[in-house]
Amino acid sequence: MYEPFRTNYVWNLAVNLALGAGGVIGEVDEVCRPLIEAAARNDDPAQEEFLQSWLKMAGRVHALAQADEKAGHLYSAARKLLRASMYYLTAERQAHPKDPRKPMLYRQMLESFGAGIRYRRDVVEWIEVPYGGTTLPALFVPAEGQGRAPCMIHFDGLDVMKEWIYLAGIAQELRRRGIATLIVDHPGVGEALRLRNLPSIPEMEKPASAALDYLETRADVDAERAGIIAVSLGGYYAPRAAAFEPRLKCCVAWGAQWDWHERVVARLNPNATTQRSVSHFADHLNWVFGKASIEESMKVISQFKLDGAAQRIACPLLIVHGENDRQIPLSHAEALLSAAIKSPRRELKVFTLAEGGAEHCQADNGSLAVDYMSDWIAEVLGGRVQ
């Protein structure tokens, strides 16, 4: 993993996520160079310096895009707008949940992303998935070709959102393999959390069922060939959904989970050796779960365990994990694999240090995971691999 900050894993992870979703190394390096001393301090003023450095670059790239727009060069503007959206996202993702600038940063990301997608003429639909008395925002990427296609429902994790998922490239790879993708901001992430105040829940089969109900209304989707994939904490979300929603025909855990409660307890220990994914970790959890205290959040998190659920998974299951994952031990992936006794095809793919993609959710080289998962999904759901 590219590690510009010697002792700050959280910031290094953020840098790699930005690079993996379209960030340019020269711009990212310019963001990081002034932050070396702040990264070592890692105090509240350091978090502000991190935000300001990313925001400065986002503003600069956004201004370049506006100049392209004024000149009528919309394809050029699109490239810059999509980069700016990731830089806004990186600043927003690390900001404290109660930072009054967070909604503004998020909307700037949404606006930049939306304009970039439209100017580039990507084949993407903005969708509202009916869910209870509200809706879940989603991006739908249709399959290439004619007729009704298989579809993957893509959920997020603890701290990424549908725009990052899209720019990480898996929907485009599935599209060329003849598979559609519905990327959903489910309760606890993205627009569902930020603009609709929908906290995360253990029963992730509920939004998965809502997504399937929506897919059944589309003439271009074969809902009988629908699966689910999710990243990071999504390694709980996707298997949980597959365990309790029998319509799902495959499941991909992009980064395994087994007992997330145990991991959170370990991370909250002041002397923890396991790594966190975001700054202000406890406050971020309270925000995601809609609770006023970490004690209340932990009551919900205590239900985030797959023992008892994994044994119900009756569809093909792929678990993708990194040998050097510093957030979730490989033993969690192995436990999930062992427990999924009803799955007719279960596989654990471990990316090693020798081949790359060895970090958490392949943050060091996401393209390796995207290729592997896309080919596996195409084989299982009847897509194309060539």
Image: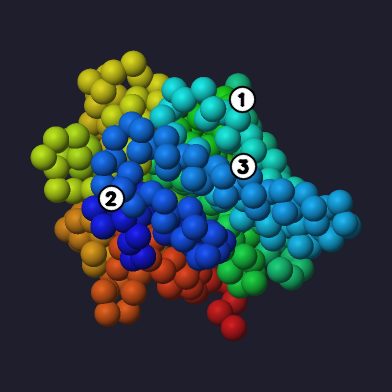
| Residue drawn 71% across the image and 48% down it | 63
State the residue at coordinates (28%, 18%).
293
The amino acid marked with disc number 1 is Thr
Label 2: which secondary element: loop
Q: Counting residues from the N terminus, which is met first, the one under dot 3 or under dot 2?
A: 2
What residue did someone put label 2 on?
8
Which residue is denoted by mark 1 in the rendering? Answer: 134
As measured in the structure, the alpha-carbon distance from the residue carrying label 1 to the one carrying label 3 is: 23 Å
Closer to us: 241 or 139:
139
Query: As rendered, which of 364 and 244 lies closer to the eye?
Result: 364
- Alpha-carbon neighbours of circle 2 within 10 Å: few (<14), some, or many (≥20)? some
Q: Quadrant of residue 214?
A: top right
Which amino acid, by three-letter code, is at mark 2? Answer: Asn
- Mark toward the viewer: 3 or 2: 2
Left or right? Give the position of 96 relative to 165: left
Residue drawn at the location 74% of the way across and 70% of the way down: 145
Q: Is residue 312 left or right of residue 19?
A: left
The residue mark sitting in front, 1 or 3, is 3
